[in-house]
Amino acid sequence: MVPFSVNHTFSLASRAGVRHKPSMSLKINSSRGGQGVAAATSRAAIPVAAPDLGGNEEAYVVEAIRSSWISSTGPFVQRFESEFAKLCGTRTSLGVCNGTVALHLALLGLDVRPGDEVLVPSLTYIATANAVRYVGAEPVFVDVDPATWCIDPKLLEASITRRTKGIIAVHLYGHPADMDAINRLAAVHGLWVVEDAAEAHMARYKGRVVGGLSQIGTFSFYGNKIFTSGEGGALTVNDPQLELRLRTLRGQGVDPQRRYYFPVTGHNFRITNIACALLCAQLERCEEILARRNAIFARYNALLQGTPGIGLQPVADWAKPAPWLYAITVDEDAYGRSRDELMAMLSENKVETRPFFRALHRLPPFREESRRRKEELPVTDGLSVTGMNLPTFSALTEADQERIATVIRSGRR
Ligand SMILES: Cc1ncc(COP(=O)(O)O)c(C=O)c1O
């Protein structure tokens, strides 16, 4: 038994701050500004995320149900895999049941084994490191670059040992990692690279869409992601041999030429035709969804730029980040309040936010090994206690954003 001392009570919102109500219902009357810090009223709360399901989502799900193709076979699966690959500029893509499974399958496909080590950032969602443990390997944590908040290529070499097999580069909070530098180092040391693009749908690195910049890209379509199927995930891949291995392992290891013959131990990691119906509708509006979220990002930038103590997410000159959840940092000395105090203040004003991920190397499953390796990750430690995400979803109004910014600006002491 794993000892547990944590309170298990949690909600979907507390995990990822997402509501599955139609986002239009979240529109609130907040046209007036200047309500100040202690202006909590009976208005509806603004969630941190909400899906945009305003296109053919419902029609396609109904179509899938009426066709009786509700499991993992059906026309929407093939259509999604082909369209998603096209968008990412890869030869193919494979749908799976979530982003964690996408990482797990990637590591199985790359033949990662017990005793191997995989370099990962510590500032990421826990799934990145958990997947490494699922295959019996050990995640070795590397600090992030303050210029991108992604794994720092300059620090990778010092963490490579005889056991290192690969690197998972997470495109954190929509910003791509510096893939050329990472790939160069990986080539020198004979390592593979996986891009964890769960939070970075359609982000661009030097003009190229993420997911096709290394051996395998992995994606999540959880309810708070830019494109969503509630739960869902995908892998993008170019190498046909690797694709065959991944498809085999995804489907219980069955030999595609011989029914009920299983040459390897595989898994059931498949996605459903219903989830792909949702995804096909989302991808039809891909440009529209991105444009709406980019406009929200631009407005936050304009509203918050220059607020003493509030830091905006850095953007490298080679990056076109994906507009996932707008991120800021709070410098307690300059702002006069801590990140947590600002979050509490926004909550009193009915605005949901979420803190940055906790540094994984300090969490119970990983901290002993991390201490043994004497890992020191000051940039990760700093960002994880000062960073937070603001509401970002299609139905967020300009008035909502002005109200959020007013609370932030007027909260400074
Ligand atoms: C960076 C990162 N990797 C992996 C995942 C796992 O995806 P899922 O929740 O779909 O399993 C997530 C998030 O949700 C994530 O943010």
Image (cartoon, helix red, strand yellow):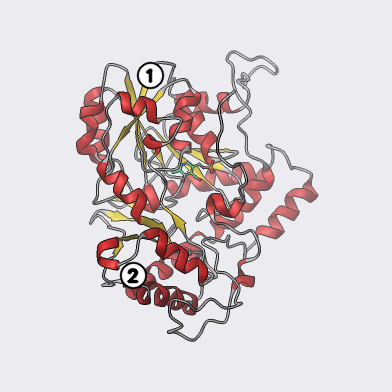
* Secondary structure state at the residue bearing disc 1: loop
Query: Where in the figure is residue 246, as x and y percent of width and height?
Result: 52, 27
Q: Is residue 208 visible?
A: no
Q: Which residue shows up at 51% across the image and 23% down it?
A: 245
**Occupied quadrant, residue 29:** bottom right
Residue 116 — which label? 1
Query: Where in the figure is residue 277, as x and y percent of width and height?
Result: 65, 50
Q: How many marks?
A: 2
Q: Residues within 10 Å of mark 2 (few under 14, many from 20)?
A: some
* Secondary structure state at the residue bearing disc 2: helix
Q: In the rendered view of the protein, which quadrant contains the N terminus? A: top right
Seen as rendered, the residue at the extreme bottom is 32
Tell which of 94 and 2 is nearer to you. 2
Task: Give the amino acid at mark 2.
Answer: Asn
Residue at mark 2: 301
Tell which of 74 and 303 is nearer to you. 303
Q: Which residue shows up at 78% across the image and 47% down it?
A: 67
Q: Residues within 10 Å of mark 1 (few under 14, many from 20)?
A: many
| Label located before the other in sequence (2 or 1) | 1
Task: Give the amino acid at mark 1.
Answer: Asp
Query: Where in the figure is residue 374, as x and y percent of width and height?
Result: 27, 28
**Occupied quadrant, residue 155:** top left
Q: CA distance from mark 2 to mark 1?
A: 42 Å
